[in-house]
Amino acid sequence: MISLSQKIKHILIIFNKWEYAALCLLIIMMLVMHFVTISTPKSLVFDEAYYVPAANNILHGVSLGRIEHPPLGQAIIATGIWIFGDNPLGWRFFSVIFGAISLILFYLICRKLDLSKYITFIATTFLALDNLSFTQAGTAMLDVFCLAFMFASVFCYLKKRPVWTGIFIGLATCTKLTGILVLLFILIYWLIINRKSIKMEIITIVTSGVSFCGSLIALDTIILHKLQNPISRITYMISYAKNLTFTSYIPDISGAIPSRPWEWLFHESITYNTLTHIWGGVYNSIVNPCIWILIIPIVLFLIYLTLKHEKPAIFALCWFAATYIIWIPISLFTNRLTYEYYFYPAVGSICIGIALLLSRIKGTHINIQVFKNFLRISVPLYMGITILFLIFIYSFGSIWFRMSWAAILFLIILYYLDRFQSLKTTPNNN
C-alpha cells in the first residue's frame, strides 16, 4: 500500500515535470506579495482617485463613471467593490488577478513564438519583477485590464484565431481607447511577416469594431438601464483625448506628472500621490532600473536580430513600435499629454529582448576560466539585482517580509533557470 508521503512525493515529481510549474510558482509568489500588501496604502493612489468613485457611481447606477473612458475597466473595478466592499481589497482585487493573467498570457505568447522554456521563463520573470508592471497590477487603474485583453488578442492572433483576436481587441479598447494600439501592432507585424494573405487581418478588423461597439452599447445600457447613443459617446471620448494637451495641463489630484515619451528613456522620475507617503513609504510607478537601463541597448539588439529575420525579435520590435514609439509622433504633432506609466504596455517587448540577450551572453564560448564563471552566474545575478530593486522601490510590507519573499522567489528562479538550461536547446524540446 502506498503511503501518504509517497503519494505526495509522486505528486511533487509530476508537478515538477509539468511545463507550467515554474510559471505557476512565479504567479503564486507575485499573488502573495500583492495580497499581503493590498491594503497598503489604505488611501487612493494615482488615478484611483478618479476610477474608484467612478466605479461606485457605476455600481449604484448613478452614471457611466468617467465618460472620457469606455466603461469596461471601471465596471471591473465596480465588480470588485460589489464583492469585497468599498475598501482597498475591493478596489484592487481584480487588478491583481488581471496582472496574473497578463503574466500567464505573456508566457504563452513567448512559447508560441517558439522561444525555449529557458528564454520564456527569463522574459516572464523580468516582466513580473518590473516595478511599473507590479504597481499597475496592484492599483485600481484601467491599464492592467487593457493590457490583459491586448495580450489575449495577440495570443489568439498567433494561434490564427481572427474572430477571437478581434473580440479581445474590442474588449481592450472598451477598457481604454489605447487598447486599439494592439491592432496597430498586428498590422505592422503582418506587413513584415506575411503580406500575402490579408483575409485574417480583415476579419480581425471587422470583428474588433463589432466587439468594441457591441460591448460599449451593452455596458452603457446595463449600467443606466437605457440605450445610449454610441456615436456621441465615441465622439466625446475622442474629443476629450484630443484636448488633453501640455498647453492646457493643470495639476490634478492624481499626483501624476506629465512628461514627453522620449524623456522616459533618459531619466526615471518617481511619480507618487502625497497620500501614499505613509511611514516613509512611496508608491512608485517607475520601470525597474535593471530593465530601464537596457531599453536603448535592447532596442538596438532587437533591430540587429530583426535584420537577421529572427521572428521573436521582429515580434518584440513591432510591439515596441506600436505601444511606445507611436507616442513620439503623437506628442510632437498633437502636443498630447503623456505620462511615464504609458510605457507599461511596452515593457514586455524589452523583457523579451533582455531574455534573448542574456541567453546569448550565457551561451558565449570563452576559454578564460574567470569569464566562464562570470557567464555561468550572469543571469541569476542580474535576476537577483532586479528582485532587490523591486522590493526596495516597492516599499510596502515589513522589510523582513520583503526580504524573506525575495529569498524564496530567488531560490525558485535559480532552480528553474538551472533546470531549463539543462534541457535541450531545441525550441520544440525546451
Image (cartoon, helix red, strand yellow):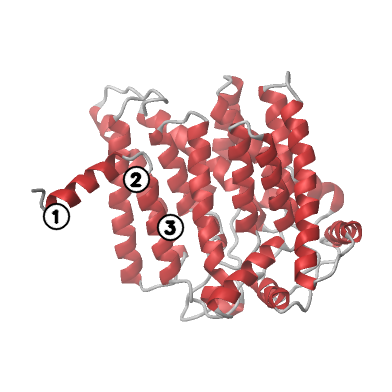
Residue 269 image position (x, y, % from top left) = 60, 61
- Amino acid under label 1? Leu
Quadrant into which the C terminus falls: top left
Q: Are marks 3 and 2 in contact (CB under 8 Å)?
A: no
Quote the CA–CA distance across marks 3 and 2. Answer: 25 Å
Residue on which disc 2 sits: 21
Provide the secondary structure element on which disc 3 rests: helix
Res. 221 in view:
yes
User: In the rendered view, would you say 163 is above or below 285?
Assistant: above
The residue carrying pointer 1 sits among few (fewer than 14), some (14 to 19) or many (20 or more) residues within 10 Å by Cα, namely: few
Q: Residue furthest left?
A: 1
- Of marks 2 and 1, which one's residue comes earlier in the chain? 1
Residue on which disc 3 sits: 389
Is 108 left, or right, of 338 in this rendering?
left
- Amino acid under label 3? Phe
Q: Nearer the viewer, mark 2 or mark 1?
A: 1
User: In the rendered view, would you say 33 is above or below 102?
Assistant: below
The residue carrying pointer 3 sits among few (fewer than 14), some (14 to 19) or many (20 or more) residues within 10 Å by Cα, namely: some
Q: Are marks 2 and 1 in contact (CB under 8 Å)?
A: no
Residue 38 image position (x, y, % from top left) = 48, 72
- Amino acid under label 2? Ala
Res. 64 in view:
no
Q: Quick one: 394 or 187, which is closer to the camera? A: 187
Residue on which disc 1 sits: 4
- The image quadrant that residue 323 belongs to is top right
Q: Quick one: 202 or 218, which is closer to the camera? A: 218
